[in-house]
Image (spheres, helix red, strand yellow):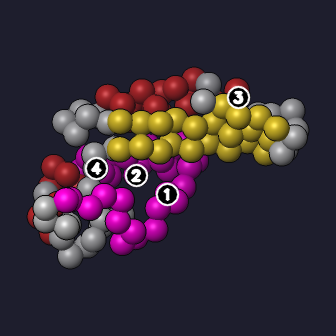
Amino acid sequence: MQITGNWGKITVFNIYNDGESEETVRQLTEYHSNNMASLEQTPQGEAYIIWLGDFNRHHPYWDNPEDSRLFTNKATEAAEKLIKAVADTGLELALLSRIPTHEHSATKR
């Protein structure tokens, strides 16, 4: 979705990433690379890009670092690929560490 105004333009990608696949992150980085000009240019103001949603990735950057059950080697490698994709596209992680994004109704984790 793109919203424009006299302040500029914001492009929002609402993402659901299957926890078993890297395909969504690959498609996002490919789209960003192939459409950089249209994403980052605006006739006036600034251009902003937001990736938001459920990436199904766990990492101490955004999960409770004490919850070590989340940080298997496989999970950490998948999260590192997401972090690299964010950095490679020039985006920044906006979610502060230890900010819960979901609370399980039974376990309250």
Q: Which residue is mark 3?
A: 37
Q: Are marks 1 and 3 in contact (CB under 8 Å)?
A: no
Q: CA distance from mark 1 to mark 3?
A: 22 Å
Looking at the rendered structure, the kind of residue marked 2 is Ile
Range shown magenta: 77-105
Image location (x, y in percent) of residue 78: 26, 46
Report the Cα–Cα distance between label 2 and label 4.
Answer: 10 Å
Circle 1 residue: 93
Asked if residue 83 is among those painted magenta in the image, a careful observer would answer yes
Q: Dot 2 corresponds to which residue?
A: 83
- In-image side of 98 versus 71 (left or right): right
Secondary structure at numbered mark 3: helix
In space, the residues marked 3 and 4 are separated at their CA atoms by 29 Å
Q: Earlier in the sequence, mark 1 or mark 3?
A: 3
> Which one is in front in this view, the residue at disc 3 or the one at disc 4?
4
Instruction: Mark 3 or mark 4: name the one nearer the start of the chain.
Output: 3
The quadrant in which residue 5 appears is top right
Q: Amino acid at mark 3?
A: Ala
Q: Position of residue 87 (x, y in %)?
A: 50, 50
- Residue located beneath label 4 in the image: 57
For the point 20% across and 67% down, the residue is 109
- Amino acid at the residue labelled 4: Arg
Q: Which image quarter holds the N terminus?
A: top right
